[in-house]
Image (cartoon, rainbow, N blue to C red):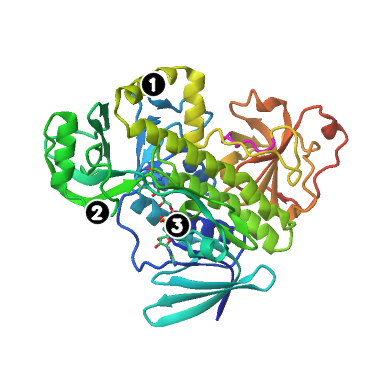
Amino acid sequence: MKCYDVIVVGGGPVGLWAACESKLAGLDVAVLERRRQRVEQSRALTIHGRTIELFAMRGIDDRFLAEGKPIPTGHYAGLETRLDFSCFDTRFPFTLYLPQSRTEELIEDHARDLRVEILRGHRVNDLSGNAEAGYELTAEHEQGASTFSARAVIGADARRSIVRQKAGILFEGHDATLSIMMGDVRIKGLEGPPLLMVTNERGGVTIAPVSADGTVRVIVIDPERKHVPVDEPLSLEELAAAARRILGQELQLSEPSWLTRFGDETRLASHYRHGNLFVAGDAAHLHFPAGGQGMNVGLQDAMNLGWKLASVLKGDAPDVLLDSYETERKPIGAQLARNTQAQGALMTRFDPGHLALRSEMSELLRIPEVNRCLAGVLSGFDLRYPSSDLFGSGDGAGERIPDRSLTLMDGTSTSIHSLLCGGKWLHLSNQSDAPVPLPHWLRSDTVLAGDVKHAENDAENRQVGAMLIRPDGYVARKVMQDSEIRRGQQPLPRNCTGM
Ligand SMILES: Cc1cc2nc3c(=O)[nH]c(=O)nc-3n(C[C@H](O)[C@H](O)[C@H](O)COP(=O)(O)OP(=O)(O)OC[C@H]3O[C@@H](n4cnc5c(N)ncnc54)[C@H](O)[C@@H]3O)c2cc1C
């Protein structure tokens, strides 16, 4: 029997990222994935700017930017007024279109660089044990079945998650109430990369670019076909006829690479943790895919969990740190369910009342504060975790840390996000004798410490004496210049890793 610190069940984007993060933090990890081959379907096209920041914090953003197509704005419920990301302090004020199949491949490359063990063709069909004794998993494969053991298990195994079921975690919500047609196809005579969203009294049609070879995604919400079961096969003719009826013009669709229906089933895990069993991604939250969020939120679940799991399993942090995974991430899952239900209501009803509601909402989105509020939720840029005694509450606790170019005292030019690439905590100080107190459980050799001589665009941060940043890019705590803490503070312990 092979023993690991962590077994991740499910090798989709979320499972692979959870494995990367756990491995980077020093755990022995394996991924068990039932499919022999990677999924070829495009599924998630939208990568939000905050997710590109996660990739930047691990030094792999260029791989995604080199292939994806940046779209300067986003959408909420396909409303005419688009979401504007230019108000956020980020290097990536856009969404990036890249098929999920390619995103998964790039994450898998990163996992292989980190030497994560990925076992394809392994379907987990049994799981038992507990946090004290450890867990045992059985997986079926071509040669029969194998047993694995692990101290913790991450269920990134989506809708029917065996990990969630064995943990006794409920998946509360509702079944699909409607179905929507979708095809990755070519459209004859369509020039350039299209992005079209039409909603009228007959229904809704969206066309979005999928890949540079001219493949586009056509999504059709046809009230006359919306009660067809999600699993009923879709033909190119049905998709084309529905699009024609709504648009009032012929779309010459051909070469379908994927035809499917999807629904608005919405569910949220009652807990994200049971013992040392965890759920992340679609195993924790399922929803109507609007605004490009499921994979993005799942990747952020994984980013939140990996370093916490390592800190606890290595015996550094108290077990309660793992409870903060649910405390921080479940409200995000609930928000995801809510906003996609609201978008679903706006996108799938075409009576005069709902069309008027769309117009009103679209007008409201012209108000910069309203636009920012929804853009901040969908992109993740405005996500802020509640402050917690675990990290040290107070100024800035839980805020996302934007990137900054920095010059360190030794003259090195760098940036905050590049300094996070090793997955360590980061302590930055404008003056070496003004440290932030570390949480009592945090081992100082897991903290990278640097004294900043100069930071770009930092009118705001000029008042910050020092800050401690978590491995997932959120502020644990800031100490302001001349604060009482700073005046009474001892220097950082000597064994913090210097830069
Ligand atoms: C049409 C559509 C468009 C979408 N667009 C977007 C978008 O633009 N942006 C966005 O962020 N999200 C989008 N999503 C949602 C996104 O596709 C999902 O949220 C994402 O795939 C979730 O990733 P995951 O790793 O949690 O689950 P999955 O990708 O489903 O991966 C789960 C993996 O677990 C494996 N597995 C399951 N059971 C077992 C088992 N017992 N043993 C071993 N392996 C197992 C499966 O084979 C699978 O590979 C869209 C979804 C749809 C349907």
Q: CA distance from mark 3 to mark 2?
A: 21 Å
Q: Which residue is mark 3?
A: 158
Which amino acid, mark 3?
Ala
173 on left or right of 497: left
Q: Which residue is mark 1?
A: 362
Where is residue 24, by image quadrant?
A: bottom right
Which amino acid, mark 2?
Glu
Mark 3 C-beta to ligand 1 under 8 Å: yes
On the question of residue 415 being in view, the answer is no
Q: Residues within 10 Å of mark 2 (few under 14, many from 20)?
A: few
In the image shown, does 29 or 449 lie closer to the viewer? 29
Q: Which residue is mark 2?
A: 232
228 on left or right of 291: left
| Label 3 vs 2, first from the N-terminus | 3
> Which x, y percent locates residue 431?
76, 34
Where is residue 360, by image quadrant?
A: top left
State whether residue 284 is above or below residue 3: above
The magenta segment is 397-404
> Residue at left 43%, top 21%?
365
SS state under label 2:
loop
Q: Quadrant of ligand 1?
A: bottom left
